[in-house]
C-alpha cells in the first residue's frame, strides 16, 4: 500500500467546521455486510483504549460507553479497558499476533493502522459508511481519508489535534515577558525566564515521541511542510540539513537550561505535573492536554500559542492530525453493534460533550457554541483555525519503521550523540529497510 502525503489535506480537515465560532478470522478485502445479531443477545462489546487515571477524559469516555449500553438495539454492554500509551502499543501488537484483539480498539491513523489492515486484522467499514450517508458526511473533510487504504475505510476518527505551546500567564506576567511573535523573541523569553530562576519549558525524554515532536515542529518552521511532503515521496532524505539543524537547535535549548534538570530520564506525567504545578513556564504538547491543564491548579492562568517559525515565512505550520480514532477488529462477532458504537461515539451529542466538557477538538462538522468553550480551549481553536499547514507526527506517517527511529534519533541527539551522525544512521536504516 502506498504511503499517503497528507499535510495540506489535514489543514483543511482541522479548520473545516471550526470557523463558525468480532467470529473467525476473515478476509479484510471484503466489506463487512452486517454479521451482528439483534437485541436480546446480551453480549459484551469489548473496547480497548489509551488512557490513565491522570487523564481527565476517562470519565467522559466511560460515560459514552455507559449511555450506549443503556439503550442500543443489539442489547450489548460495552466494557472499556484503558492502558498507558506505550503499554498500549505493546499490548495491541501482542493481541494482534494472537488474534485476540478486543471488538473495538483505539488506533492512530496512517501507517500505524496500515500493517494491521494488511494483515487482515481490521474490519472494512466502507459499506456501513456508504449505507449511511449522513454519518459519512458528518466527518470533517479529509479525516476519513487518513484511515483509508486502497480506497476502503477501516476506522472512524473522534477528534483532531495539533501541537501548541501551553504557557502560564501568571509566570509570564511576573517575569514581564509576552507571548512571542518571532522565533528570536521566543528564545529571548526563554533566556529571561532562565535568568530569573524559572524553568522555561517542561520536557521529558523517556517517551521519545515527545521531544521528537518538538524537533519536527522546529524543522517545519525552517523549511515548511514541503520538507514533510518531500520525505514522504522520497525526494528528500532523513539526514537532510533541516532535520540536523532542528535537532541541534533543541540540543542548544537543553544545554542552555531551557528544560528542567534531569528531563532526559523523566516520563510524560512528571513533565506535565511540572507545568500544571506552576514549576515551569511553558509546555509543548498536543492540544488534547488542554482539558487536563484547564482543570489543574493553573486553571484560568493557562494559555496557548503556536511556536513561531524559525523562518517567519513558515509561520502557522504545525505538527497535527486526527486523533483518538477507533477501528473494529476482524474477529469481532457483532460487527453491526461495534459500528453502531462508533456511530454513537461520533454523534454530534457525544462530540459536543467531549468538546465543551473535555476540550477535545471534534472530527465532526457542526457549528460551535463559543460561549460554552473554556478560555484555554477558545485559544486552542483560534490557533487551529489559523494554521496554513499540518504535518502528522512522523511515527504516524511512517509507523514503527522510520517514524519510531526518527523519535529515537532525536532523543539520542539530546543525549549527546552528534546530530549529523545520528541522522545518517536514520537514513541508513531507511535504506536498509526500503524493501520491507
Image: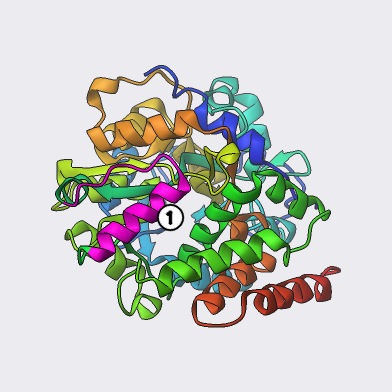
Evaluate whether residue 37 shows in this view: no
Taking depth in this image into account, of 173 and 32 the one nearest to the observer is 173
Span colored in magenta: 175-195
> Which residue is under mark 1?
47
Residues packed near mark 1 inside 10 Å, few (<14), some (14 to 19) or many (20 plus): many
- The answer to whether residue 32 is magenta is no
**The stretch drawn in magenta includes residue 188:** yes
Report which quarter residue 68 is drawn in.
Answer: top left
Residue closest to the eye, 39 or 394: 394
Q: Residue 352: image x %, image y %?
A: 33, 29
Q: Quadrant of residue 432?
A: bottom right
Magenta stretch: helix, strand or loop mostly: helix
At x 61%, y 38%, the residue is: 34
Describe residue 213's horizontal placement relative to residue 381 as left or right: right
- Could you say which is closer to the camera, residue 365 or residue 75? 365
Relative height, residue 99 to residue 261 (above, below):
above
Q: Position of residue 289 (x, y in %)?
A: 33, 50
Amino acid at each position: 500500500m502506498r504511503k499517503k502525503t497528507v499535510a495540506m489535506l489535514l489543514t483543511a480537515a482541522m479548520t473545516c467546521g471550526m470557523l463558525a465560532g468480532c467470529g473467525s478470522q476473515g478476509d479484510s478485502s471484503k466489506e463487512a455486510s452486517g454479521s451482528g445479531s439483534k437485541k436480546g443477545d446480551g453480549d459484551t462489546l469489548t473496547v480497548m483504549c489509551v488512557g490513565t487515571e491522570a487523564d481527565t477524559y476517562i470519565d467522559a469516555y466511560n460515560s459514552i460507553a455507559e449511555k450506549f449500553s443503556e439503550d442500543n438495539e443489539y442489547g450489548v454492554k460495552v466494557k472499556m479497558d484503558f492502558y498507558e500509551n506505550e503499554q498500549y502499543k505493546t499490548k495491541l501488537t501482542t493481541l494482534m499476533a494472537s488474534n485476540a484483539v478486543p471488538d473495538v480498539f483505539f488506533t492512530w491513523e496512517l501507517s500505524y493502522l496500515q500493517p494491521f489492515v494488511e494483515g487482515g486484522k481490521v474490519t472494512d467499514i466502507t459499506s456501513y459508511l456508504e449505507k449511511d450517508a449522513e454519518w459519512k458526511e458528518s466527518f470533517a473533510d479529509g479525516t476519513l481519508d487518513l484511515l483509508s487504504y486502497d480506497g476502503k475505510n477501516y476506522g472512524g476518527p473522534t477528534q483532531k489535534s495539533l501541537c501548541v505551546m501551553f504557557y502560564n500567564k501568571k509566570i509570564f506576567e511576573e517575569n514581564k515577558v509576552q507571548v512571542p511573535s518571532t522565533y528570536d523573541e521566543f528564545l529571548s523569553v526563554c533566556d529571561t525566564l532562565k535568568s530569573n530562576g524559572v524553568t522555561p519549558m517542561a520536557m521529558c525524554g523517556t517517551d521519545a515521541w515527545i521531544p521528537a515532536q518538538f524537533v519536527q515542529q522546529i524543522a517545519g518552521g525552517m523549511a515548511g511542510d514541503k520538507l514533510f511532503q518531500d520525505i514522504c515521496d522520497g525526494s528528500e532524505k532523513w539526514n537532510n540539513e533541516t532535520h540536523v539543524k532542528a535537532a541541534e537547535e533543541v540540543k542548544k535549548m537543553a544545554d542552555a537550561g531551557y528544560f528542567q534538570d534531569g528531563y532526559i530520564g523523566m516520563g510524560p506525567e512528571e513533565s506535565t505535573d511540572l507545568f500544571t504545578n506552576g514549576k515551569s513556564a511553558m509546555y509543548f504538547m498536543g492540544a488534547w492536554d488542554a482539558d487536563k491543564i484547564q482543570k489543574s491548579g493553573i486553571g484560568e492562568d493557562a494559555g496557548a500559542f503556536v511556536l513561531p517559525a524559525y523562518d517567519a515565512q513558515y509561520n502557522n505550520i504545525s505538527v497535527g492530525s486526527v486523533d483518538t480514532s477507533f477501528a473494529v477488529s476482524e474477529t469481532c462477532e457483532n460487527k453491526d453493534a461495534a459500528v453502531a458504537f462508533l456511530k454513537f461515539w461520533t454523534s454530534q451529542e457525544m462530540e459536543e460533550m467531549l468538546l465543551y466538557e473535555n476540550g477535545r477538538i471534534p472530527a465532526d462538522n457542526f457549528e460551535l457554541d463559543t460561549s460554552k468553550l473554556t478560555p484555554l480551549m477558545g485559544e486552542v481553536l483560534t490557533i487551529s483555525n489559523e494554521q496554513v499547514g499540518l504535518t502528522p507526527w512522523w511515527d504516524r506517517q511512517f509507523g514503527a519503521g522510520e517514524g519510531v527511529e526518527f523519535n529515537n534519533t532525536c532523543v539520542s541527539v539530546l543525549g549527546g550523540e552528534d546530530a549529523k551522525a545520528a541522522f545518517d544512521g536514520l537514513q541508513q536504516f531507511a535504506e536498509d529497510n526500503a524493501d520491507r
